Image (spheres, rainbow, N blue to C red):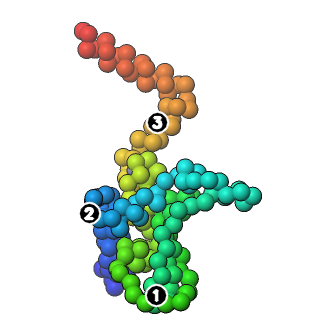
């Protein structure tokens, strides 16, 4: 394994750990719970911003001693956590926040479209945490859309029931 690949793996491992921490929803871990709470459909989060056609979204903001203001938000379309960095008057003190870690993984930690679990989005096209989740959704969508699929599912059920009765 070359140096670049090794570093990438290392990065993904750390991102994985952050995702796990968010998934744990540990009662003691208020910082993580606060971050996890950002994930909700933006339209459910509050009033629609008048005139802009956009939605108000919840964010977590922290001013740092480095003179940076970090804003963490959930990007709805990609379903990822992102951090925006701006300069500001340096804060006098700071306590460590999960935000500081997520900053280095902006856009990499995503929430699954199916089950809402956090996972590491190693490819930008990923929208599900796992193959199982994607398959489940595909199946459901397929059934919902096609009457043939529904009929086939019903026939399978009938066959199973008949086999059981025999
Ligand atoms: Zn999932």
Identify residue for label 1.
91
| Residue occupying image coordinates x 47% and y 77% | 62
Residue 5 drawn at (x, y percent): 36, 78
Mark 2 or 3, which is nearer the eye?
2
Q: Along the polypeptide, which appears first: circle 1 or circle 3?
A: 1
Q: Position of residue 105 (x, y in %)?
A: 43, 74
**In this view, 152 is above or below 140:** above
Which residue is depicted at the point 32% across and 18% down?
160
Q: Provide the residue designation for mark 3.
A: 140
Instruction: Name the quarter where the C terminus is drawn.
Output: top left
Task: Please state the horizontal and vertical placement of residue 47, each as a whole percent of the image.
Answer: 62, 53
Question: How many C-alpha atoms fall within 10 Å of the one at disc 3: few (<14), some, or many (≥20)?
Answer: few
Relative to residue 73, is residue 69 depicted above or below?
below
Give the secondary structure at mark 2.
loop
Camera-side mark, 1 or 3:
1
Q: Secondary structure at mark 3?
A: helix
Is there CB contact under 8 Å for labels 2 and 3? Answer: no
Give how far apart the Cα atoms at labels 2 and 3 are: 36 Å
**132 or 35, nearer to the observer:** 35
Quadrant placement of the N terminus: bottom left
Provide the residue designation for mark 2: 28
Q: Is mark 1 within 8 Å of ligand 1?
A: no
Question: Does any portion of residue 78 appear in the rendered image?
Answer: no
Residue at 31% x, 77% y is 10
* Residue 32 pos. (x, y %): 35, 65
Tell me how many marks there are: 3
Q: Is residue 3 left or right of residue 47?
A: left
Q: Residues within 10 Å of mark 1 (few under 14, many from 20)?
A: some
């Amino acid at each position: 394994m070359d140096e670049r690949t090794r570093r990438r793996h290392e990065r993904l491992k750390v991102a994985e750990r952050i995702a796990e921490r968010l998934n744990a929803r540990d009662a003691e871990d208020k910082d993580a719970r606060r971050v996890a709470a950002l994930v909700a459909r933006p339209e459910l989060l509050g009033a629609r911003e008048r005139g802009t056609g956009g939605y108000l979204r919840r964010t977590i903001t922290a001013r740092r001693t480095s003179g940076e203001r970090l804003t963490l938000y959930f990007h709805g379309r990609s379903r990822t956590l992102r951090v925006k960095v701006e300069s500001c008057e340096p804060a006098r003190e700071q306590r460590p926040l999960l935000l500081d870690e997520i900053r280095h993984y902006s856009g990499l930690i995503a929430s699954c479209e199916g089950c809402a679990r956090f996972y590491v989005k190693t490819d930008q096209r990923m929208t599900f945490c796992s193959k199982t989740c994607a398959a489940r959704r595909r199946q459901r969508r397929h059934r919902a859309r096609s009457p043939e699929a529904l009929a086939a599912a019903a026939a399978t059920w009938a066959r199973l029931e008949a086999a059981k009765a025999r």
